[in-house]
Amino acid sequence: MMQDLQQLTLALSKGRIFDETLPLLEAAGITVTENPETSRKLILATTNPHLRVIIVRASDVPTYVQYGAADFGVAGKDVLIEHGGEGLYQPIDLHIAHCRMSVAVRAGFDYVTAVRQGARLRVATKYVQIAREHFAAKGVHVDLIKLYGSMELAPLIGLSDAIVDLVSTGNTLRANNLVEVEHIMDISSRLVVNQAALKLKREALQPILQAFEQASARMA
Ligand code: ATP
Ligand code: PRP
């Protein structure tokens, strides 16, 4: 099958990534003509006849781009680290969806002493790669428990001593009587581009990448 070198597919996830990417698309003169919150459609048209948007799970964005099913996409640094980044070119920090990756424990749990005494900690997280690297660098022995969501529950119910999770306002931690004890890294979302598309579709991609870069630099 001949590749249409003009046709571009952008992978986005519903919610904050979609919402915060819209102004960047607008800066490139592109409007998405359907709303994923009200439409059940997963392939959305835009005002640019050469660009369509596909709606996928946030953690699936790198996979679609890696295999070239999408030419480019937007994903959090957390998602990209967990995925491994294979087959992806990461040219731009878009400075959107800002948050941080942190270690949190139940209020009253003496994390510092537990670490100092060399206790083996049970840590529940969706971000096992980031957690493994963080504790290995500190020389802390941990048993990692993989979860897919609602990490905040784990220390409250006795599943783990600590969690590694995303924090923004801190409201979710506070609401669950948890405290942040370590800041692991700052997180924002990146543009990722399929490496083959970058070469083959450069002409179609370049103006959009440039507009994204300029608009995101203004947000930095
Ligand atoms: P999935 O659907 O694959 O489980 P998810 O539910 O984490 O993923 P979103 O909640 O849409 O997906 O988050 C997308 C990205 O936004 C995350 O990967 C992260 O980089 C960032 N993010 C997550 N939570 C926040 C937050 N509270 N404030 C700002 N940015 C956030
Ligand atoms: C994210 C994250 C935390 C919360 C932190 O969840 O998993 O639970 O945000 O934000 P805060 O510090 O401002 O409370 P999100 O709101 O995306 O819910 P979801 O993961 O269930 O989509």
Image: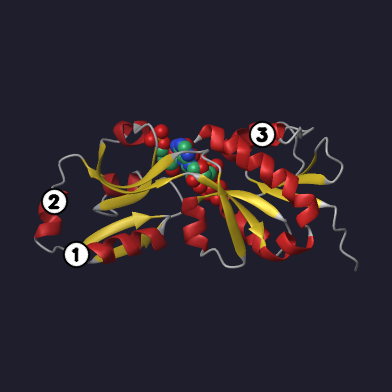
**Quadrant including the N terminus:** bottom right
Residue at 68%, 53% in the rendered image: 72
Please tell me how crowded label 3 is: few (under 14), some (14-19), or many (20+) other residues with Cα within 10 Å: some
Cβ–Cβ under 8 Å for marks 1 and 2: no
- Observer-nearest residue: 30 or 9? 30
Q: Nearer the viewer, mark 1 or mark 3?
A: 3
Q: Residue 112, which numbered label?
A: 2
The answer to whether residue 162 is seen in the rendering is: yes
Q: Left or right: 120 with respect to 71?
A: left
Cβ–Cβ under 8 Å for marks 2 and 3: no
Residue at 29%, 57% in the rendered image: 123
Label 3 CB, ligand 1: below 8 Å? no
What kind of residue is marked 3?
Leu
Residue position for label 1: 120
Quarter of the rendering containing residue 40? top right
User: Does residue 44 sit above or below 81 in this rendering?
Assistant: above
Please tell me how crowded label 1 is: few (under 14), some (14-19), or many (20+) other residues with Cα within 10 Å: few
Q: Left or right: 5 with respect to 124?
A: right
Gap in Å between the C-alphas at discs 2 and 3? 42 Å
Percent across and percent down for residue 196 are 72, 66
Q: Nearer the viewer, mark 2 or mark 3?
A: 3
Percent across and percent down for residue 94 are 55, 42
Rendered image coloring scheme = secondary structure
Q: In what element is the residue under mark 1?
A: loop
Residue position for label 3: 22
Percent across and percent down for residue 100 are 38, 43
Q: Residue 220, which numbered label?
A: none
Q: Residue furthest right?
A: 2
Q: Earlier in the sequence, mark 1 or mark 3?
A: 3
